[in-house]
Image: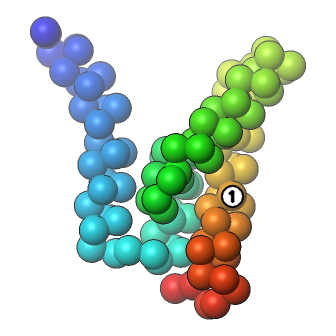
């Protein structure tokens, strides 16, 4: 395995490492979840447990948008921007209407 492969592996693993660390030290903070979704898109859904289903749902939105528009950049931008309201909704569901911090 050469240097380019290691760089790609690090680029893939860094968001998951950041999310795992923030989940440990700042659990259930809405602002952390929103920032993660802004920076990492659908991967930020893993901040709350059972985020895999929502990640795959957002990935499906990306695939469908890409099939319709044939523009990967705009499809990714739309799918990533949908990620923020999704995590907001998940926090409201998690806290049962309580004020999230």
| Residue 57 relative to residue 36: left or right | right
Instruction: Answer with the quarter of the image where residue 94 lies.
Output: bottom right
State the residue position of label 1.
86
Q: How many marks?
A: 1
Residue drawn 46% across and 59% down?
49
Q: Nearer the viewer, residue 53 or 35?
A: 53
Q: Choose top left, top right, bottom left or bottom right for residue 72.
A: top right
Q: Which percent across, then down, holds residue 33?
A: 50, 65
Which coloring applies here? Answer: rainbow
Give the residue at x 26% y 25%: 9
Which residue of the protein is positioned furthest toward the right in this rendering? 68
Q: Is 84 situated above or below 29?
A: above
Where does residue 41 sit, x and y in percent of width and height?
56, 46
Q: Name the residue at the bottom extreme.
A: 99
Q: Is residue 12 visible?
A: yes
Expressed as whole percent of the image width and height from the top left, the position of residue 25 reads 27, 73
SS at mark 1 in the image: helix
């Amino acid at each position: 395995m050469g240097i380019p492969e290691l760089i790609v592996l690090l680029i893939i693993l860094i968001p998951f490492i950041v999310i795992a660390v923030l989940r440990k030290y700042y659990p259930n903070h809405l602002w952390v979840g929103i920032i993660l979704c802004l920076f990492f898109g659908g991967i930020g859904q893993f901040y709350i447990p059972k985020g895999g289903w929502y990640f795959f749902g957002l990935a499906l939105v990306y695939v469908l948008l890409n099939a319709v528009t044939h523009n990967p950049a705009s499809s990714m931008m739309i799918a990533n921007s949908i990620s923020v309201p999704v995590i907001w909704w998940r926090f409201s569901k998690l806290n049962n209407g309580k004020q999230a911090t």
